[in-house]
Image (cartoon, rainbow, N blue to C red):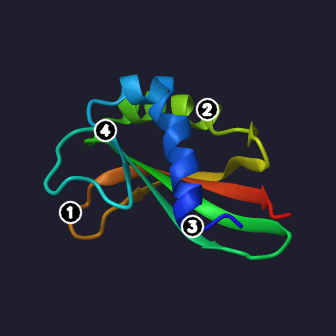
Amino acid sequence: MITTLDAEDIVWNWLDNSPLKNAVTGGIYKNSRPLNSDKEDVVINSQPISAQQLQEGLVDVNIYVPADHARMQILAAIATSLLTEVWIDDVCFSVQQQAVLEIPETHEPYISIRLLFYAVNL
């Protein structure tokens, strides 16, 4: 059975060995980014994952970018191309939706990519 922590690790490993890692000025992290970071950071976290034979869940990939629309377009294109129809062993994930959201306290924009995550639990 895949846990939410496993799902985060799988997506993190996929992105940490991808062109997105070299494209951002910061790093790729699980659950949170460094405090007061002013770099382009990628943060991966997972929503609940079912425990059925075909496990389903959601994984969020958030890309924090200082307010630069052109730069956000570039990073969103790189990330979505890397996260569309990925198969690794008995796991599959793909982009369900993408949006640009804002951190309420700071009004900092970020790219939000929600992945549908499936795992075969035999």
Q: Which mark is residue 27?
A: 4
Question: Dot 3, how many residues are within 10 Å of its Cα: few (below 14), some (14-19), or many (20+)?
Answer: some
Q: Position of residue 75 (x, y in %)?
A: 45, 32
- Check disc 3 and give the amino acid type: Thr
User: Which residue lies at the image location 26% right of the left edge and 60% below the top edge?
Assistant: 107
Is residue 11 shown above or below 48?
above
In three-dimensional space, the C-alpha distance between marks 2 and 4, rounded to whole angstroms, equals 16 Å
User: Under tag 2, what secondary structure?
Assistant: helix
Type of residue at label 2? Answer: Leu
The residue at the point 40 percent across, 29 percent down is 21
Which tag is nearer the camera, tag 2 or tag 1? 2
* Residue that mark 1 sits on: 106
Q: Is residue 94 visible?
A: yes
For the point 52% across and 63% down, which residue is it? 5
- Choose top left, top right, bottom left or bottom right for residue 14: top right
Which amino acid type corresponds to the residue marked 1 in the rendered image?
Thr
**Label 2 neighbourhood size at 10 Å, few (<14), some (14-19), many (20+)?**
some
* Comparing labels 4 and 3, the label whose residue is closer to the camera: 3
